[in-house]
């Protein structure tokens, strides 16, 4: 029975800022072992939705369920305590600090009793190295500054950290947007691995070519409303691209450009 209960579910969520409707009646859920892709262009409402999922904003309407229980996130601490981890685009990593220090920031393992307690660097380095290796990244030196890592490796530090600290839902905000093809594929493989290990992953992106190979289901947002949730088998890539690009608007543009060329010819 538990298998069918979503790890997290949003039902008919709306969020207003004054008179501006950021989200209207959006529903979304993610299950264990699944990559749920939330797609939409800039301004579609993706970031407002993330903020509702991660406790930064409370929705004005609608309900949030965690493991089938109705829940209210009063602060970003609440979802974290329930195993819902959000990895933002800026990652929240400190470039000058080591991989290990970033991995354990605020939750450092210590040794020796108080008042002699110190950061247990050896055990922390070992854990950080092991956990990165588990998701397929071999870090040469856990003491190296995060700033020396590639964009893809930084993403993996943030993801490995969330998994190690007990995340069961991983919300990833545009994790591949600033990455080249090779780096992006490294991150996408890790996303698949996380889902295979039983996590629910919500991948937020505007890049259909990154989402399509890894996603199981797709929810498309357009100007704050959902255009629906689709299983991959019911949604050819071309259809998804045209929904995302506002196919009609592009067709209209082509007609107008053709007209301009004709007039100028």
Image (cartoon, rainbow, N blue to C red):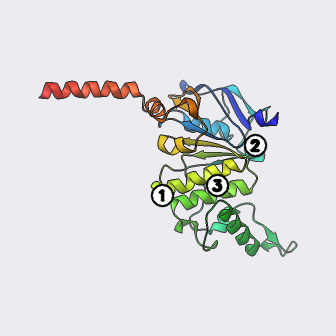
Give the residue furthest to the front.
233
Instruction: Find residue 190 and report its horizontal and vertical position in percent.
Output: 61, 54
The secondary element bearing badge 3 is classed as helix
- Report x, y in % for residue 66: 76, 36
Pointer 2 or 3: first along the chain = 2
Tell me the SS state at disc 1.
helix
Report the mark closest to the observer, 3 or 1. 1
- Which of the image's four quarters has the N terminus? top right
140, above or below 91, in the image: below
Judge the density around disc 2: few (<14), some (14-19), many (≥20) Cα neighbours within 10 Å: some
Q: Judge from the rendering whether residue 171 lies leftward or rightward of residue 240; answer left or right.
A: right
Which residue is the site of mark 2? Answer: 78
Q: Confirm whether residue 207 shows in the render.
A: no
**Frontmost residue, 216 versus 199:** 216
Q: Residue furthest right?
A: 113
Whether the residues at callouts 3 and 1 have beta carbons within 8 Å, the answer is: no
Disc on the earlier residue, 3 or 1: 3
Question: Residue placed at 69% from the left, 40% from the top?
Answer: 55
Q: Quadrant of the C terminus?
A: top left
Distance from Cα at disc 2 to Cα at disc 1? 35 Å
Q: Quadrant of residue 171?
A: top right
Which residue is pictured at 60% across the width and 73% down the height? 140
Label 2 or label 3, whichever lies nearer to me, is 3
Which numbered mark, 2 or 1, is in the foreground of this view? 1
Question: Looking at the picture, how far across and down is residue 78, in whole percent?
Answer: 75, 43
Task: Give the quarter of the image for residue 13.
Answer: top right
Q: Which residue is mark 1?
A: 182
């Amino acid at each position: 029975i538990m298998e069918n209960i979503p790890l997290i579910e949003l039902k008919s969520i709306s969020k207003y800022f004054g008179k501006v409707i950021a989200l209207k009646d959006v529903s979304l859920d993610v299950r264990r072992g699944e990559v749920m892709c939330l797609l939409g262009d800039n301004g579609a409402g993706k970031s407002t939705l993330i903020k509702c999922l991660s406790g930064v904003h409370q929705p004005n309407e609608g309900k949030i369920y965690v493991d089938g229980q109705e829940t209210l996130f009063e602060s970003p601490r609440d979802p974290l305590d329930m195993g819902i981890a959000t990895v933002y685009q800026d990652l929240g990593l400190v470039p000058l600090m080591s991989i290990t220090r970033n991995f354990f920031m605020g939750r450092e393992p210590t040794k020796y009793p108080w008042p002699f307690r110190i950061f247990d660097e050896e055990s922390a380095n070992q854990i950080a190295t092991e956990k990165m290796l588990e998701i397929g990244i071999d870090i040469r030196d856990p003491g190296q500054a995060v700033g020396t890592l590639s964009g893809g490796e930084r993403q993996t530090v943030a993801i490995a950290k969330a998994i190690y600290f007990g995340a069961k839902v991983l919300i990833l905000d545009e994790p591949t947007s600033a990455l080249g093809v090779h780096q992006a594929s490294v991150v996408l493989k890790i996303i698949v691995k996380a889902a295979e290990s039983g996590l629910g992953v919500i991948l937020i992106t505007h890049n259909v070519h990154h989402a399509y190979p890894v996603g199981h289901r797709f929810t498309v947002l357009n100007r704050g409303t959902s255009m629906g949730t689709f299983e991959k088998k019911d949604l050819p890539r071309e259809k998804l691209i045209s929904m995302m690009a506002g196919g009609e608007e592009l067709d209209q543009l082509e007609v107008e450009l053709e007209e301009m060329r004709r007039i100028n010819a």
